[in-house]
Image (cartoon, rainbow, N blue to C red):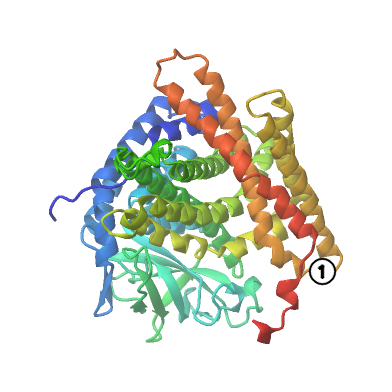
Amino acid sequence: MPDLPNRYKADLREIRFRLFEQLHLDDLLGKAPYENWSKDDVEMILDEVYKWSCAVLGPLNPVGDRQGCTFKDGAVTPPDGFKAAWDSLFDAGWRSLAVSEEMGGQGGPLTLHIVAEEMMAGANTAFSMYPALAQGVAEVIHRCGTPEQAERYAKPLFAGKAGGTMCLTEPHAGSDVGANTTRAIRQADGRYKIEGTKIFISGGDQNFTDNIFHLVLARTDDAPPGTKGLSLFIVPKLADDGSSNDVAVGSIEHKMGINGSATCVLNFGENNSCFGELVGTEEQKGMSMMFQLMNFARIGVGVQGVSLASAAYLSALDYAKERKQGPNIANWKDPTAPKVPIIQHPDVRRMLLDMKARVEGIRALVLKLAIHTDRQVAAELAGDDKAAQAHQGQVDLLVPLVKAYGSDQGFQVAATAIQVFGGAGYLKDHPVEQYCRDAKIFSIYEGTNHIQALDLVGRKLSQKGGANFQAFLGEVNAFVKANQDNETYRTGLTKLGAAAEALMSTAMRLWNWFRGGEKEMVPLIANRFLEMMAETTVAWLLLDGAIIADSAAAKLPEDHPDRAFYAGKRHAAVYYAHNVLPGVTEKAAILAAEDKSALDIPEAAF
């Protein structure tokens, strides 16, 4: 292929700030289980992954979008260059950063994997889905399968020698996984014959690897109905002798975005000769196992959200600095006044600051979850079960926020970036229109955002009798109290305290609806509650980062370039606290009114 330009951009200074100055990843480095890692190692990886993403993945992003995948003679061919990128990725080792050493990985922290994933997904979302799914499948088999299965299936997946997919959705069931009807028929040799159809299977076929290991949810004929009756099976594309295992691609989807990602209909057992093996040794554990993959994937979707939001914002920022149009507002009546870069226009500045605050806020949210995970692993290894459980409790709470809010904001920021470009942003000459199209799927797959909201209000808030949620609010309130005398952020901190109070009162209202038999109110307002909690969390993290930045800036000489960087943290936090955070208390008031219009309206009246 001819040399192609790269249009991807990332802000490594911002990423380093979140990692080291705010979340203190370096406190974990050099100690078990990350004793072989140093801050210098992480810094080097950040630089190298960014260079690789710009050199290899970025140029292929518009290629994948315009070519898409082709389906011919039962096989899928991804866009030009994708196979070479796959080989280059695994040669470089960027997928194995946080994979355990026993599985052939580098044993690094999840937080490092997350920032590497942000850059790779931002450079080429469609391509990055293939290896991300393979790694997720490998993790499930490693954790839930037998040692023999880990050796036979997980290791090749981690090494890029095989692809992997998650096969949940069926044509008649959609998001209602419990309605799945794919059959698993026990065989005398311990295997299971698999029969059924799965849809929307990302990476369902490709030409990077000879084999693909499909994780398939299916039920034995004697299993109970619903999700409790589902078991999880490893179903290879090819049998051990290299022959077909009767897994056929029925078709591929033609989509709004992520066109380089093969989204397939897969038919299992059309010729009555598709066989799989149970993950682990117990039937009817499928959903609990698949939830591990879904959680991994949901975090990954949040990362995709921030990756495209960041790329779109930085593209819009560069354009706003270069594009000259109209005079400065001070000279708006002077037809002879010189044209100025559009970054000087107030509404463009508002859009840019809005994007900056949202991008940095959702990145902080994603990395907050990641650092909790790394601290949990370290605490478990140290035998501190109480600390490990506390970190896990916060991870559980944050997963639906990361997936839903991160994905919603990714699309919103990309749309705002188009607005900054104006008509030019609607053209394929610039990358932001693709970012917007690619980002729309994030709120839909891996459990729609409404499912994330139901998970939050129906399961996560009440875990440990609400102790995890109380601990979360305790951290927010402690932060407000500790910084209440800070004049710069006094107003924002007051609003944050009010938001935390509104969040608690709304949670109590939710629990009262559950207990009082008004369960229909819960799904009606679940999305809004998730937004409230996410906006409270983001405001907290932005304000925390701003206070850290102010302290760091005060130690620098006036002409140091980092002073402008740190000032950006202050302005982003103030903007978000003054313009977005007040919506939390407003939403709480709306929910308290218990409007049931959407429930009361007759169907015919729609």
Across and down, in percent, residue 456 comes to: 67, 56
- Quadrant of the rendered structure where residue 240 is? bottom left
Q: Is residue 120 visible?
A: yes
Residue at the outermost left position = 2
Instruction: Find disc 1 in the rendering and name its residue.
Output: 518
Residue placed most toward the observer, 402 or 164: 402
Residue 534 in the image: x percent, y percent? 62, 48
Q: Residue drawn at (72%, 61%), measured in percent from left and top?
A: 458
Q: How many marks?
A: 1
Mark 1 residue element: loop
What crowding class fits label 1: few (fewer than 14 Cα within 10 Å), some (14-19), or many (20 or more)?
few
Q: Residue at x 61, y 64 (%)?
A: 450
Three-letter code, disc 1: Glu
Image-based side of 205 in relation to 166, left or right: left
Q: Is residue 461 visible?
A: no
The answer to which of 496 and 276 lies nearer the viewer is 496
Q: Is residue 585 left or right of residue 411?
A: right
Where is residue 349 shown, x and y percent of the image?
Answer: 45, 41
Quarter the C terminus occupies: bottom right
Quick check: 580 above or below 518?
A: above
The answer to which quarter of the image holds residue 107 is: top left
Q: Quadrant of the N terminus?
A: bottom left
Q: Going by the picture, which residue comes out furthest to the right? A: 516
Vertical placement of 208 versus 187: above or below?
Answer: above
- Left or right position of 61 against 174: left
Q: Which residue is at 40% across, 15% downward?
A: 559
Q: Position of residue 39 (x, y in %)?
A: 43, 26
Q: Residue at x 55, y 22 (%)?
A: 550
Residue 560 position (above or below residue 86): above
Q: Give whichever of 82, 93 is nearer the camera.
A: 82
